[in-house]
Amino acid sequence: MRPSLTISLAVAALLLAPLSSLADATLRVAAPFEIVSPDPTVSGSIFTRMGVAETLVEVDAEGRLTPGLATAWEVSADGLTWRFAIRDGVAFHDGTPLTAAATAGALEIARAKPGLLDRAPITAIAAGDGAVVVTLSAPFAALPAFLAEYRSQILAPASYGADGAATSVIGTGPYRIETLTPPQSLTATAHAGYWGPAPTIADVAYTAVGRAETRALMAESGDAEFVYALDPATVTRLRGSDEVTVHAAPIPRSLLLKVNAAHPFLDSAEARRALSLAIDRQGLAQAVLRYPEGADQLFPPSVAGWHSDALEPLAHDPDEARRLLAGLGWTPGADGVLERDGRRFELTLTTYPDRPELPLAAAVLEQMFRAVGVALTIDSTNSSEIPARHAAGTLELGLLARNFALVPDPIGTILQDYAPTGDWGAMGWENAAFVDLANRIARGEAGAAARAEAAAILQADLPVIPIAWYQQTLAASNRVAGAAIDPWERSFGLSAIRWAD
Amino acid sequence: MPLLSRALQALAVALLVGVSTFAMMRALPGDAAWRIAAGRYGYDNVDAAAAASVRAELGLDGPALPALLQWLGDLFRLDFGVSLVSGQPVAAELAHQLGASLQLALAAVALSLLIGPPLGVAAGLRPGGALDRALLVAATAFRATPQFLLALVLIVLVSVELGWLPAAGHGAARHVILPSLALALGLAATSARIARDATTEIAATAFWRFAEFKGLSRGQVLWRHGLRNVAVPLLTLLGLQFVTLVEGVVVVETIFGWPGIGHALVHAIFARDVPVVQGAALMLGLGFVAVNAAIDIALRRIDPRGAA
């Protein structure tokens, strides 16, 4: 293959020579998220991550809510009226000032779209004197957390078209968009009138690159300084590189097994615990996800208040699993698969390949369950089949990944998934005590003790069987310093990054 | 009446592509409303409520036939509709993406013509020589290597090891080189073989020997009598290579993060964005007809013997 290759390389060398090293002063970001549209509900997470748009409430690394575009907030005694004081001296990128009216308008537009704010019991969002006043129909303690989510970002009134869909992104963040080219790229530059500390690196660029292999190669070749979301194999390879530093941080996303608790084989906590005991979580996490360990409870340590070190960890004990199943009347058949009343312990596990690790994890689970006498059939199909089969009552087991903290307070997800059931959570599960606890926590009437109690119910009753906690990964070029992963995945933290000396 | 027959052919292709993409998208497993909602709001935000709102907004529950007839009707008014995911007009999105793909495809064809035929002709003039044998091995290897692998090898070699070109991206001229090279090497492999065979064939003809006999140098013979003959099968091949090119564009654009029509097609299929899938498939189908028509015309100019 010499001649063509030599010639091609020569051609390439000739063509590129005068063009290399374009804009060395630009901090280049590569991530998998495509820019579909300027609208916050659609691609808004990219604009908050890039520091273009901001929210009323911010979140620190520990998950505590901190002031953002709102300097403070308070709730009335009945829990039905919230006041968010708007920060003075903030200007949108088009020069217009941030006002209570503009903020209330942006939030009302967000509330009219499906997704987040329309799920909170909000009756009105209005502009008061230097403050935004949110009126509720029922107490809702997680409101500030909801206002920290990307879909609650505040854009200037001029951003929105007549139908409420944003046509441009005029935010208040440290970076102002210069070019926006869906689906792939945006460039931004420091916003001179930013209210907070000015970013160190003035010019940033974002490129959506769907394939993890390509992103990893961009990190290695120095085509991007900040490469987000790497595949497990790449992480291992990049850790040996002198050019980049790999960061990994646990995020509030869990790999879990959704169980139909109304299924005759799975309707007792003992049966679900037996399945849980059959899983070698550490082995699965190391082999499939290349993480050091699996999950020993549903919520990862980053979900403060819900993760509890006091809970007894979920363990791997196939012998105990067999004992529990024998106690439920199951006896091994000729081929080792358990039988009871003439029925074999056979289940269908539904999963989807959108996350490439899921079918692999399903195959590992099939082996582990077979070892205790449970035969699985894996159906790797469209992800919508899980909620569809949930609705039809035909789902038996579902393997899925669920993010608990799209909003920095997991209560929204918990209400949706476990009080009492949900598309991506419990199925056929009824636990009045849990529902009551969740509702009280949501209204702000119960605190840490109630959360610990609720987490203990999930651990004991296993409406879903936790398997692993996800990690987010980042490859940062050694030419920059200060890059870090936000465990809440709200920001790339670009304004804190500087060129290394 | 070649133009009229080509126009009819284009119409048939449009109908066939439209109906078959429509049928295929309907036949895909899974609930389209969920997929579209995932494309719009992200996987983490998809639930029954989001899917229901998408379903109600787009009327996805309606019967298939009226939806198909509606699309065909719109098509004849040159209205491609709006993307179900981004809400932007499909025609505007496709125009943008088609530009990016054409840039890539034209660069790839140009590169492949610079690499393949000159080597093929040189090899064909000395069949069995060192160059001919080396070219056979190289062409077989490049044709047999999947573009996916070739693209990754090129990135590792040229971007990571040598640091000459960016691994991915779009915008500057240097971004076009690696993806077009990944496409060009496969194309050049075939065109080199065709050029090589055509050259040996021409070099064995009586008129070639006569030209040499009358004292022309080998270069002169090739220039005056050879190249025009070699060009005929090459041009025909170019028309056929359009298919390889389309296939390659889909793969290569995904790897290099190139915002072209192939990349858009892949994403649209995942998100069940039927208008974008139909629009993109239609563009590619009509592109095939247009390229073949252009090549027919060019062939008639080069080799007027066939025109009766």
Image: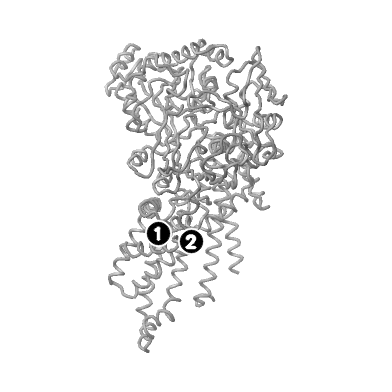
Query: Residue at horizontal 44%, vertical 49%?
Result: A223
Element marked by disc 1:
helix
| Quadrant into which the N terminus of chain A falls | bottom left
Give the position of the C terminus of chain A as an image quadrant: top left
* Horizontal and vertical percent position of residue B277: 55, 47
Residue drawn at point x = 39 percent, y = 25 percent = A467
Q: Secondary structure at mark 2?
A: helix
Residue B156, given in percent of the width and then of the height, sits at 37, 51
**In this view, which residue lies farthest toward the front?**
A501
Corner quadrant of residue A94: top right
The residue singled out by tag 2 in the image is B107
Chain assignment, label 1 = B
Residue situated in front as seen by the camera: A331 or A110: A110
Q: Amino acid at mark 1?
A: Gly
Q: Quadrant of residue A120?
A: top right
Distance from disc 1 to disc 2, alpha carbons, whole Å, reads 14 Å
Residue B116, label in figure: none
Name the foreground residue: B190 vs A212.
Answer: A212
Q: Earlier in the sequence, mark 1 or mark 2?
A: 2
The chain carrying label 2 is B
Q: Residue at x 55, y 61 (%)?
A: B289
- Amino acid under label 2? Ala
Is residue B80 left or right of A18 when viewed as pictured?
right
Nearer mark to the viewer, of 1 and 2: 2
Task: Give x and y (percent) for residue B68.
Answer: 62, 45
